[in-house]
Amino acid sequence: MAPDYDVEFIDRGDRDREARFLVRDVSPAFANGIRRAMIADVPTLSIDEVRVIENSSVMFDEQIALRLGLVPLTTPDDYEIGETVTLALDVEGPGTAYSGDLVSTDDRVEPADKNVPIIDLKDPEGSETPQRLEVEADAVYDVGREHAKHQGGVAVGYRHLQTVEIVGDADEYGDDDPHILRGVIEEDGELIPTEEFDHDLTQRYPGKEVEVHDVPNAFVFHVETDGSMSVDELVTQAVDTIHGRASELKDAVQL
Amino acid sequence: MSYKCSRCKRDVELDEYGGVRCPYCGHRVLLKERSRDVKEVDVN
């Protein structure tokens, strides 16, 4: 039986895309499992096939297709792996084609950021018609393990929660070098992000000699998504995939 | 094969006897037009 774990938020970024939270009483292996699941096992929608109807821009169809593939799309959670949504883009120069110009057949699926430039279209002098890009694209629901464009978590990592122990007074004639520490420290049960003292322990504990220790089985996760889903959804779906595979293994072993 | 003359911008059909030359203005630089087919591209 797994021991009771505990989750506590430290800060949440804007637009539900970024968060930092503390998880206690999980093993390092499990913490890393969650991290890996967030990167590779949570499916998102991403453009996978492009039908180019017209492309008189200066770039090859394949280059434009690659750019379209990397546009993060908001992803509802009721899709199945391999399911597709069709999107269309039709822009004529002069001007820039942006991700926001993509039109989707499913209202819930749209570019997470509207201002990703796809290509600059010109109206060249001496040309009869301005440059034009008209494409139809199929976005497919798949996992980050298959292709990096399907990664929902883009900056996912964790550090140990740490404590600072005062072991004595600092050497009076020693160099006053900064003692840099990045992350979150715990002091008398209170969580203090190191940004509060400019990541410098000599600012928080002036004139003291300190030792930094890891708190066992306590991890501070920093999670940032590409906008295809909120941090909450990403983390819960990542844990669900681990749970799914664990029960699959359990059933398989019992046979 | 459909081409476009780079000088007079007119559409040119080439056959095997005429050689590479615009029948309207005699210019020898012809540009190949993009096919009107829809091209399928796999993103990877």
Image (cartoon, coloured by chain):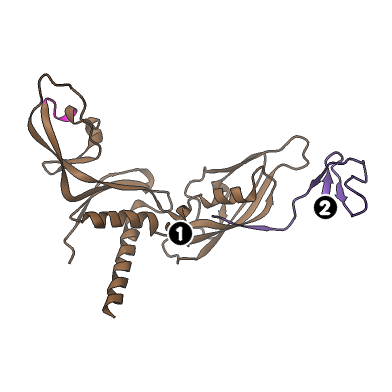
Q: Is residue A198 visible?
A: yes
* Place of residue B41 in the rendered image (x, y in percent of width and height, measured from the top left): 61, 56
Q: Secondary structure at mark 1?
A: loop
Residue A204 belongs to magenta span: yes
Magenta part of the protein: which range?
A203-207
Q: A2 above or below A180? A: below
The total of numbered circles placed on residues is 2
Chain of the residue displaying label 2: B
- Front residue of A53/A74: it is A53
- Give the side of residue A222 with respect to residue A76, left or right: left
Give the number of the disc on residue B2: 2
Q: Which mark is residue A2?
A: none
**Chain that is coloured purple in the picture:** B
**For residue A205, side relative to residue A220 (left or right):** left
- Of all residues, the one furthest to the left in this rendering is A168
Q: Residue at x 89, y 45 (%)?
A: B21
Image vertical order of residue B29 relative to residue A86, above or below: above
Callout 1 amino acid: Glu
Instruction: State which chain is coloured brown.
Output: A
**Residue A168: x and y, percent?**
6, 30
Residue A233 in sight from this viewpoint: no
| Cα distance between the residues tagged 1 and 2 | 41 Å
Q: Residues within 10 Å of mark 1 (few under 14, many from 20)?
A: few
Label 1 sits on residue: A146
